[in-house]
Image: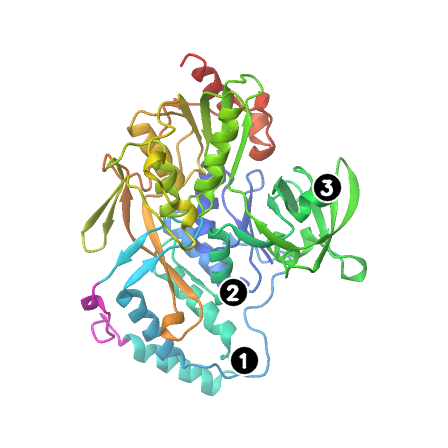
Amino acid sequence: MNLRFSIPPEVLRQRGAEISQLMMGVLPGSATHIDEGRGILFVTLPQGLHPALATDTVIRALAGIGITAYFMADAPNYVPPIQVGEKKRRGVSLPVFIVSLIAVALAACILTVFTSGALSGAWRLGADQTLGTGDQKGEDYAGKIALVDMIFEEYSLYDTKGERLLDEMLRAYAAATGDTYAAYYTEEEYQEMIAENNAQMVGIGIRAIEDSEYHDILIISVMPDSPALEAGLQPGDRITAIGSGEGKALVFDIGYHAAINRLRGEAGTVAEFTVVRDGQELAFSVVRAAVQTQSVEAHVSESNPTVGVIRIMQFDTSTPTQFKQAMTDMLGSGCNRFVFDVRNNPGGDLKSINAVLSYFLNKDDTILITTQKDGSSTVYQVQANTYTDQYASCSVAEAEIGMYRGYPMAILTNGNTASAAELFTAVLKEYQLAEVFGTTTYGKGVIQSIIHLEQWGYKGAVKLTVGYYSPPSGVNYDGVGIAPDFEVSLSEEAAKKNLYLLGESEDAQLLAAINHLQSK
């Protein structure tokens, strides 16, 4: 499902990265493309998200950061906001669910975040923080919801019941709170999120993004030991169609996210799709399987064999293990200087980033400071930790603390370096362990928690911002970002290409870091 919004070209040129990051927060699972020349923001919606709700969410979110956007009603695949159909009863009354949800948000005991795009942690709330419905300012909160629900139930020609309405209403509730990163997830979306954070997925085993020129699926990497690797898929391949025969659908027509969903499926089933490589179409039939996702990639510099280039794409629960393996491989190849590339890294899990930073710091060094709504603070320090659950790979042995501290290092950042990736940058910079090259980071210094509703008898989950986090200096960079030590921009030609497919000779930021390390 594709939506289009008209925004002044000069605004898109100046704030394009900010707008893209905002869309990731308010419409989880969506994909965006910015056409600066025509002044158009394209938003590809995830499957099941109603376009009318998404339209309102986008316009409100942009207005919240001072940007006026106009919906372009001729966007392809747009449908009216309500479809006539048989009324279906939902399993729980709307007012009861809303009131329960509010109580859940403030009375939960332990909140743990699993999203890849949010710096995460555990938060403990007291029993006295439960929210009632009688202290709302103005009109009776629950009573007004109940009244509107009753009016629609009694008089509406259209279906006002069913899970879809409830899901969309809760998405709107999250969007209307003013919390840019708040979201409601269905049970299916929540489980997918957990699997992603735990570096597990069922599919063909590729990392992909929406191609900015053709609006189809661009493969940026193929995961090791995956069906895709065995089938011969390569970085740079464009998946242009999903299915075969009469069931074949162009990615451009159905939208990027819908196409990605069609590539997914149960292990043992077959994914059929068409790839364009070097101008030629190739048909693939790949059997889906469980795949270990890849968050870290490494290679030896083409221009300096003593420099290992390690790209960290996100911080999930497998990242510490993958990072250590990457360092082992690079050290074994003769590298003794390192460039850590966190450009376009949206962030990740708190335990994951804590583990990775522990490899560079000394015991008891401060990693970050969190500040909650009530003003209380928590200081996270480097310690040996052992986990036996899904966080087992985030365990840190005493001998691993500071094991990579002595090497000359540089970090690459851009406007899409966010959250946990910014913390990685800030900590190594503040401890004077690495210098930063590139452009100013996104500026996300707030922390989210995700609450699964299962323990209260409901499906789904809610994400909300619960506090600030700051690096060891205590200076919070939310809305500001982290400025590099050396401001380096890509050339105009290189900036038009996909970062993941950029060659070293074209990458001015990488070359600047490598050249700087030669003197170390």
Q: Position of residue 266 (x, y in %)?
A: 63, 61
Whether residue 437 sits left or right of residue 83 in the image: it is left
Q: Which residue is at 39% across, 75% downward?
A: 457
Closer to viewer: mark 2 or mark 3? 3
Magenta range is 126-140
State the residue position of label 1: 158
Closer to viewer: mark 1 or mark 3? 3
State the residue position of label 3: 232
Does the magenta run of residues contain 127? yes
Q: First in sequence, mark 1 or 3: give its number.
A: 1
Answer above or below: position of 327 versus 103. Answer: above
Closer to viewer: mark 2 or mark 1? 2
* Helix, strand or loop status at disc 3: loop
Whether residue 301 sits left or right of residue 408 in the image: it is right
Does the magenta run of residues contain 506? no
Give the spatial CA distance, label 2 vs label 3: 30 Å
Q: Which residue is at 68% across, 52% downward?
A: 251
Mark 1 closeness class: few <14, some 14–19, many ≥20 residues within 10 Å: some
